[in-house]
Amino acid sequence: MTYTDTIAELQRRYPDGVPGGIPLSDIAQLKLQNSYSTHLDIARAMAKVMRADMARYDADTSQFTQSLGCWSGFHAQQMMRAIKRQKGTLDRAYVYLSGWMVAGLRNSFGHLPDQSMHEKTAVTALINEIYTSLRQADEVDLNDLFNALKTTDDRESVIAKIDSYESYVRPIIADIDAGFGNVHATYLLAKELIKAGACCIQIENQVSDAKQCGHQDGKVTVPREDFIEKLRAVRMAFEELGVDDGVIVARTDSLGAGLTQKIPVSREPGDHASEYTKWLDVSPVSELNPLADGEIAFQQDGQLVKPARLPNGLYRFRDGTGEDRVVEDCIAALNDGGADLLWIETATPNVAQIASMVNRVREAAPHAKLTYNNSPSFNWTLNLRKQVREDWIEQGFIQPGDYDEARLMSAQFDTDPLGVEADRRLKSFQTDIAREAGVFHNLITLPTFHLDALGMDTLSEGYFGEDKMLAYVRGVQRQEIRRGVSAVRHQHEVGSDLGDTFKEMTGGDRALKAGGEHNTMNQFADVA
C-alpha cells in the first residue's frame, strides 16, 4: 500500500485517534517498513519473481539472473546495497546460499568439508538471518525517508520516494545438499527452508551419506528413481505450504561421479533402472570369468554380467560415460521429477561442453534451463588462457610450441594478447553461456569466503607490518568513503537510528537518543 492509502486506512480505523495518542504517521511508518508478515510470505512473493524472470529469460537470453554466495546476512545485505547503489535497481539479482559455506563456516562442529556433516538447522538459520538482514536494510532506508518527511517542505517528493521504494528482499536459491537423509527427511527439511523464506531449493543426485563436494573425487550417485522421489518431496513441501510457484533446481554430479551405491531393479526395458545400469562397468559371466563367492550378477541385453565392484561395495561406471549419464539425468529430472531448472556440475568452465549437453537435453525437454556454478574451484585464468591458446593453434594464429602452457599463470601474460583475449572471454562468459547453453542463472558459490580471506590477508599484512593504521585507512575506510559504501557509518548501518526513531515515537522529548551532536558517526555525514 502507498503511504497515502495507509494513512487513509488508519484514519478509518481510528477516527478518534490511536489509543495512547500515537501519531498515525508513526503507525504508517512501521507498517510500511514491515512489508512481509512472515518469511513464508517472502517465499511466496519471491517465487513469483523467479517465475517472471524465467519467462523473461525465455523471451530474451540476455536477461539472465545472477547471484553471489553469502555465508551471513550482512554479506547478502551489503551485496544488495552495492547493486542498488550502482545500478539503481535489484532487478535479476538473487542470493545464493551455499551448502559448502554452511559446512565450512556456519556449523557448531567447526570448519568442515562439503560432506553434509553440518546440522540441518544451520541452513534454515542462515536463510532466516539473510532475510532478517535484508529486511533491516529496508527499515534503515525507509526510516531515513520518514525522517526526511518530518523536516522537508517538499513532502510530495519524499512520499513519492517512499511509495516507489524497492525492497532489498530478493530470491534465495537454497542448497539442500542431497537432502540430508531419506525422502521423508528431505521433505521435512525442505519445509523448514521454505518457512524460513526459500522460494527455490537446489538438490543434488549424490548419495546423502556419501556426499562429496562437487569438485572433489569419490562422488557416488543415486539411481534416477531415488532422485525423482526427492524432487517430488521438495515439490510436495512447496505445495503444502502454499508456495505454488516454488522453484526446484535439480543438480547432477554424474559428469565427475564414477560410482553408484546400488543397482536399481528394472521392471521393463528402457525404464529408469535399466537406463541407469546400462552404464555400469560389467563383464560377461562365463567359464573363464565365473561368479565368485559374494559376487552378484544380473541380466543385461540377454547376457548374464557381473558389475565391477570396489572393496567398499560401491559399483563403478564405465569411463567416458559421464556426459551421457548427465543428459539422461537432466531429462528424467525435468520430465519425470518436475524440476524447473538444472544444474550440471562441471570440472572446467567450458561453454561448448555445457552447450553440447544442454542441446541434447533439449531434444527431449525443450524447456530446459540451467543454473550454472561459476565456481572458485576452477582456475579461471589458467583455464581461459589454455582455451585461447588451443583455439589459436587450431586457427593457425600460433604454433604448438608458442606459449609455454606451464607458465600461463604468469603475470607477464596479463597484458599479452593471449591474456587480454582470455580476459575478454571471462567478461563475456556469463552472457555467452546464457545465450549458447541455456543458463538462466549464473552464480559464484564461494565468493564471500575468498573475499574475506583476501581482505583479511591484505589488511593484516599492512596493519601488523610497517603501515599500521595507514593500512586500514587507505585500504578500507578511505575506499568506503570514496565508493559511497553506507557501512562506513557502521552505527547507522546496524539500526542505531531506528532505535532513536522508535524512542521518539513512544517517548517524544523524553527519548534518550544515540544520534546527538557527540555521536562520532557525524564525521561521515557529508562524505558517504
Image: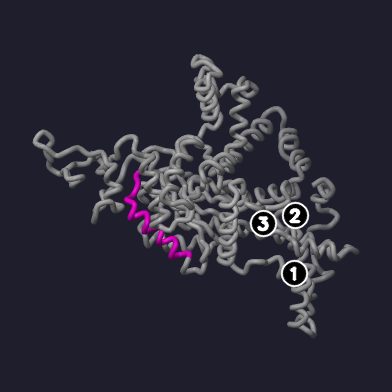
Residue 312 - label: none
Name the amino acid, label 1.
Thr
Determine the secondary structure under disc 1: loop
Determine the secondary structure under disc 3: loop
Name the amino acid, label 3.
Tyr
Q: Residue at x 76, y 62 (%)?
A: 143
Residue 472 shows in the view: yes
Q: Which residue is mark 3?
A: 168
Magenta stretch holds residue 237 = yes
Q: Which badge, 2 or 3, comes first in the chain's sequence?
A: 3
Q: Residue at x 25, y 52 (%)?
A: 269
Mainly helix, strand or loop, the magenta region?
Answer: helix
Say which of 472 and 337 sits in front: 337
Residue 2 - label: 1
Is 18 rendered above or below residue 388?
A: below
Q: Is 40 situated left or right of 336 in this image?
A: right
Give the extent of the magenta segment. Answer: 220-238
Q: Is 340 situated left or right of 94 in this image?
A: left
In the picture, residue 21 is in which quadrant?
bottom right
Query: Where is residue 518 shown, x and y percent of the image?
Result: 84, 53
Q: Residue at x 37, y 62 (%)?
A: 184
Query: Where is residue 448 shown, x and y percent of the image?
Result: 59, 43
Q: Which badge, 2 or 1, comes first in the chain's sequence?
A: 1
Query: Where is residue 306 shown, x and y percent of the image?
Result: 19, 41
**Is the Cβ of the residue at disc 2 closer than 8 Å to that at disc 3?**
no
Residue 492 - label: 2
Name the amino acid, label 2.
His
